[in-house]
Image (tube, rainbow, N blue to C red):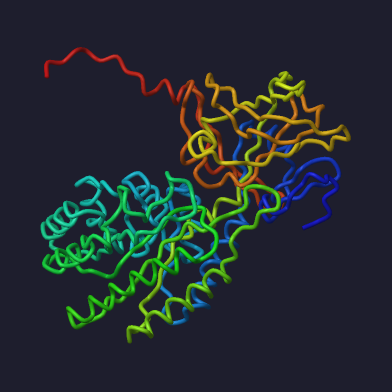
Amino acid sequence: MANHPDPHFAPEVFSAHSEFGANELTIGGCSAIGLAKEFGTPLFVLDELDFRERALAWKSALESSFGSHAGSVFYAAKSFISVEVAKWIAEIGVGIDVCSAGELNIALAANFPVDRIEVHGNNKSEAEIAQAIAVGVRSIVVDSFQEIERVARLAAAAGVTQNVFLRLTAGIEAHTHEFISTAHEDVKFGFSIASGSAWKAIEAVEEATSLRLLGLHSHIGSQIFGIEGFAIAASRLIDLLAKYRDHFDRQLPELDLGGGYGIAYLPGEESEVPMRVMSELAAVVKAECEKHNLQVPHISIEPGRAIVGPTTTTLYEVGTTKSVELDGGLTRRYIAVDGGMSDNIRPALYGAQYYALLANRISSRPTTSSRVVGKHCETGDIVIREIELPEDIGPGDLLAVPATGAYHRSMASNYNALPRPAVIAVKNGKARLILRRETQDDLLRLDVVEPERSI
């Protein structure tokens, strides 16, 4: 990082190749002003080198910590995927997990190696399962007894033996939002270890001649710091591996411990460090396997937002501002930008918190209590509920909101008929479009006028 003359610039929440020069924010060597002028706003700016470095860091940490027992790093397509990003992932040498036919088709359009594709989802359609089997994906993570029957039947019809994992709930309340916590008992995902349904699922898969059980899978949630929850989940899954070994007189070869590792969204926070997490997790796994006299299985992980989340910054243009008097004689400045909940639903959905920076200049004016809001016709359309920003921010200024790579463009909507923003990749002072901005013509193209039909 270079010197940052703006004291409000917080390197820990911006991508690795972002800095504040003499007068403006640059990302990947590209001027924020220039990017906004060339590509418009709102705009997702993805730091390509940072993305590659983070993916490689997780891959290296897994391989270094587990050695010959290292499995695969699977990139979560749901966090953000495009054909170009899928190509980067393929080049880096990690796998990809997909949750729908749409995500699978993006991977296939990028010629992603099918033997590195893992298929997730709690309600896969028969068409999605059949396509996954037909193209030869590495594995399908099975989520229910009905799905065991479906995958087995469709694999038999295709004349193949399909590799599967069983997704298990380990009964852990991860320290995260209720909507993104996935491994306690009262959720839609997986088979419960505590209730015994996990063991019944194992028996059902073993009875299906068209299925091959590769291993067990657990994912305890998202935006998690520390390995305590992962350690407990690993211990409970390894207990089950031992029970499987004792019952079937053989050992399952793989264990997928999921991910959901936390990242920094606010100044002063830290993203999880891959080597620290993997080394601590490896110590737990090896100790638990030794306790049960098990060989260490191949361990795979799914870092989730930890790869793409910190790599992307959203640029907004300020449209209007106003000051609102509060109780006690206080005032709050409302700063309205040209996006909002259509490109970042997380504050409304999860209460997620973000940081913002004046990107096109350095202000010498004092800061004031501010609220960054979007342009949608909703009171809850709030990007940042409370932040200190310079009091002279006004129309035409640019705001940069960092750490918007995961679950932003992928969860974007057309609410109020707003076209979804473009995504550009920046590297070494060069920028290129990898997902173009939608247009009004794109939206209108879905409207049809058909003659009535008798049904």
Q: Indicate the position of residue 103 as horizontal and vertical percent values.
A: 37, 47
Figure check: 106 above or below 92: above
Quarter of the image that includes the C terminus: top left
Residue 60, image x, y percentages = 54, 72
Is the residue 298 above or below the residue 355 in the image? Answer: below
**In screen coordinates, is 113 left or right of 369?**
left
Where residue 365 appears, as percent x and y from the top left, is 87, 32
Which residue appears farthest toward the front when viewing the image? 328
Q: Residue at x 46, y 54 (%)?
A: 86
Residue plotted at (16% across, 51% down) = 146
In this view, 93 is above or below 239: above
Task: Give percent across and percent down for residue 90.
Answer: 46, 61
Residue 37 or residue 384, whichever sits in front: 384
Tell me: residue 311, above or below residue 321.
below
Return the residue found at the far right: 364
Residue nearer the viewer, 381 or 98? 381
Left or right, 412 with reference to 167:
right
**Quadrant of the frame with the N terminus:** bottom right
Q: Residue at x 43, y 45 (%)?
A: 178
Residue at x-position 61% and y-position 36%: 43
Total marks placed: 0
Foreground pick, 378 / 395: 378
For residue 340, what is the image quadrant? top right
Is residue 375 shown left or right of residue 68? right
